[in-house]
Image (tube, coloured by chain):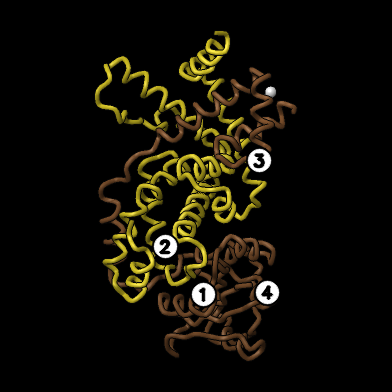
Amino acid sequence: MKCEEALLLISGHLDHANTIEEEAALQAHLSTCSACRDVLQAFEYADQGIADLQEKAPEDLCDRVMEQISQPKKKKHLRPWLGVVAAALLLVVGVSATVDLQEENIVPQTATVSEAYSVQRSVVQVDADALAQQISRERDAVVAVVREMYYEIETYPCETLEEGGVLYALPDHNAAVLLHETYGCAIYEPNENSDTAYALLVP
Amino acid sequence: MINEKSIIDQVLQGNDEAFAELVKAYEDKVYNLCLRMCSDREDARDLAQEAFVKAWRGLRFYKQESAFSTWLFRLTTNVCIDYLRQKKRRSAVSLTTDDELLQLDVPDPSPTPEEQVQQTMARQTVASAMEQLEEEFRTVLTLRVVEELSYEEIAEILDLKVGTVKSRLARAREKIKKILLKSGNDLFDHSVKKNREEDAL
Ligand SMILES: [Zn+2]
């Protein structure tokens, strides 16, 4: 066995992840190679040093968490730049339902399809309808569930969500309704007056 | 061991207070994951708090197909990685200064002042070595050595193949070994030397 191969097995040995055959081959190599014995010793030392760095969580961590989640749910406001976009878009609503928004100052963030889906892959489970309902409630906004990227939403500012999915800020309520009418997307709305609108892209 | 499933059900039924039990059960693990990822106690506390609040909000998306711990660590890892990327974006060319390094406490209360200084230095060296490690290597090493997760769990958390986890851990260990040697870690040299002496006997 070459020392390079042994390296992988030394690491596996520390994690108890080697097969019986691998372990036997490693021990045979170690018995004849002092350099690899040093590596094993050094890895053990480093692992121990890292493990020893552990600390107790701050005493107030739990209280802080509980305090934050017990606060009455505030209506979430859009980030400032989203507000600017929404305001800018409200002015042009009615002129065209598929406004082209390429100006840099009002479209600070866009995602390509592949970016959007690479975000998706890092999420364990997404229940799109439950998530859409939650966003709709929390942000007092109409939310359309979109399962593929449509050119209509591509250029709108977006944010990636921790829970999974990419949320596109639509110009208005009508844009969401239009997605529903054109593509049959499900839409969730807290009330008919809400003019904040999103498209939630999920795979 | 707390009955996780029943607590999760209680939280989902609107009993927010029950969530405190989940926080208590995982706060050390979540905090240490954040601490190793961002190397700053205050940031780690904030990130751990953010992770738990996100877990509470997103609990209905936890499908109980994977272990709750895996789901929580995945969420926490994503919170940390997002934070690190934002930080990187904010300060594209900012180097860590000495006073930004962790001042580590010594857990053992009995050693002499001299030993204490040595121990503190050794801990700081290891913490700083972890900080110098690239994010992808620091992440696997933390999940394995600090959180003691299996290759399978780490693979699920990081969306990697089990074989990739295995090879990345070996590379991570090789890298941190080099960093520690370069930093002239006395204990590290000592341990290798001691090994050689034992071999010679
Ligand atoms: Zn060798």
Residue A86 numbered mark, or none: 1
Q: Which of pointers 2 and 4 indicates the residue nearer the eye?
A: 2
Disc 2 target residue: B54
Disc on the earlier residue, 1 or 4: 1
The answer for how far apart the CA atoms under marks 3 and 2 are is 31 Å
The amino acid beneath tag 3 is Ser
Looking at the rendering, in which quadrant would you find the N terminus of chain B? bottom left
The answer for how far apart the CA atoms under marks 1 and 3 are is 48 Å
The amino acid beneath tag 4 is Met
- Mark 1 packing: few (<14 Cα in 10 Å), some, or many (20+)? many
Q: Quadrant of ligand 1?
A: top right
The answer for how far apart the CA atoms under marks 4 and 3 are is 36 Å
Q: Which of pointers 4 and 3 indicates the residue nearer the eye?
A: 3
Disc on the earlier residue, 3 or 2: 2
Label 1: chain?
A
Seen in the picture, residue B86 relative to B124 is either above or below; the reply is below
Label 4: chain?
A
Circles 2 and 4 on the same chain: no
Query: Going by the image, does B194 lie left or right of A25?
Result: left
Name the tint of chain B in the rendering.
Answer: yellow
